[in-house]
Amino acid sequence: MKNFFHNTLGNFFPNSLSTFTLPKALLSFVFSIIISITMLSFLSWITYTNLQEMGKRTEDVTHTYQVRFKNKELIKLLVDAETGQRGFLLTNNEDFLKPYLESQESIDSTLHQLSILVKDNHLQGERLDSIKTLTTLRLKAMSVNIDRIKGGKSVDTLKLYLGKFYMDKIRRLSQKIDTDEEQLLHYRNELQNESDKNLTYYLLGLSVVTLAFLAIFFRLLYLELRQRIALQITLENKLTEVEHTNAELEQFAYITSHDLQEPLRKIRAFGERLYTRQTNELSEEAKNNILKINQSASRMQLLINDLLTFSRITNMKDYVFDEVDLNLILNETKEDFSELIHQKKAMIYSKHLPTINGIKVQLMQLFNNLISNSIKYSRANVSPIIEIKYKQVVGSDIPNVEGIKQEKVYHKITFMDNGIGFEEKYSEKIFTIFQRLHNKNEYEGTGIGLAICRRIVTNHNGHIIAEVKKEYEGAIFHVYLPY
């Protein structure tokens, strides 16, 4: 296979294989694309033109069939009217007039439709005008005898003969119309068959040219792809190793957290039982020690729960991406923290946010963590103000983003508050799991919130960056999510 493509390319590009480097391959690839697009566009235009012509031929054939059908329908309606008249004249029973009356209602409509169909044919139009006149006379002759019988008189024989004379002329004119349309149908069928044959040739030519250029493209792509195969295999092996290691770590964290839950529950239960049942027998120092044990156990359980949360977020197999409206996410977050917002007199301002492809429950947790942090780390005696901004940016606008990501478009969502903020040296450290910048007695929590935020953004192939501005009091977080 390798020698086949090598020889094929040598036939297309003589004396060039020895110097055919990657840039030249790409240049030839682009050049071939331009030529192929030009050729395919030309053949596609010809094919489209023939498709239009074939469609017109089909319409012409259909039109001829319609004329013949309506022409025969008119004769049938006149025959039905004559049959109804004849039955009434013989029996004087008005039940026989039903076909006559029904045909009369349809004759005018059929003549009108025929007029529209033959308006592009002058000769057929003249014949149809004559048929219209004779039809009027034929129906009038019928109505005269019908009225005479209803009035108790005898049949007007002259009107019967005139009616037959009119009907014979109508039949002859109708036959001429049908004969001309039949000849026209034969001619149009020949044109349609020829158009179909030409279209087949054009489609065949288009397919051959397409296959030829696909063969060239395949060879040019093969030159580049074979250099990437080894690298791809290496990367896949590395990714497999990383996934296996991550799975083991996730399983370890999950199992360990579960195994620690039961001993902690027992420590808390026995500590509370000891404090409650033997409080009179314990010294103050013993009571304080028990309280500290219970507080430490509660904090350990909180840490374990947070570790379980982080483990679940890391495991992407349990989540499905879907269309998520971030405006609804923000509104639900406000509802969740409505009591705290009211208590702290916090104000949240936001612009219209986009709808993105993501995991709703994780995006909800992302907004919850960022907004709750802004409220929690507010300054004393200052109402928290949170501003959420949005705009679209390219990857090159994101710090430390390299490679193909620089060309991608991202949603940039900025969370700004007027809280206590943080020092610039901690702008990366705050995203570390269980990392706290303050004493646990100052602010509640385990320090896992921002680590979870980073994991969520990473799960969405995005970036989160903490920014510190000297002239700005508070924290700024930029969330970049793929467009």
Image (cartoon, rainbow, N blue to C red):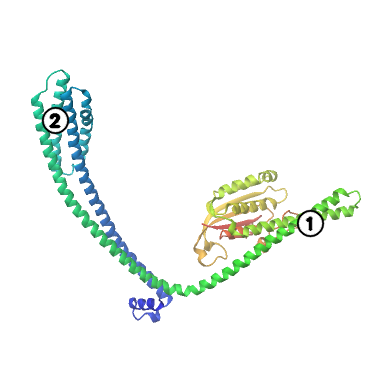
Closest to the observer, 284 or 102: 102
Measured as percent of width and height from the top left, residue 166 is found at: 11, 32
The reply, left or right, for residue 5 in relation to residue 254 is: left
First in sequence, mark 2 or 1: give its number.
2
Quadrant of the rendered image containing residue 422? bottom right
Dot 1: what SS? helix
- 29 over 156 or under it: above or below: below
Which residue is rendered at x = 34% and y = 68% of the image?
213
Looking at the picture, which amino acid does disc 2 mark?
Arg
Measured as percent of width and height from the top left, residue 125 is found at: 15, 40
Measured as percent of width and height from the top left, residue 392 is found at: 52, 56
The reply, left or right, for residue 170 in relation to residue 200 is: left
Measured as percent of width and height from the top left, residue 188 is found at: 19, 51
Q: Is residue 433 visible?
A: no
Q: Residues within 10 Å of mark 2 (few under 14, many from 20)?
A: many
Q: Which mark is residue 254?
A: none
What residue is pinned by disc 1?
296
Looking at the picture, which amino acid does disc 1 mark?
Ser
- In the picture, the quarter occupied by the N terminus is bottom left
Closest to the observer, 283 or 422: 283
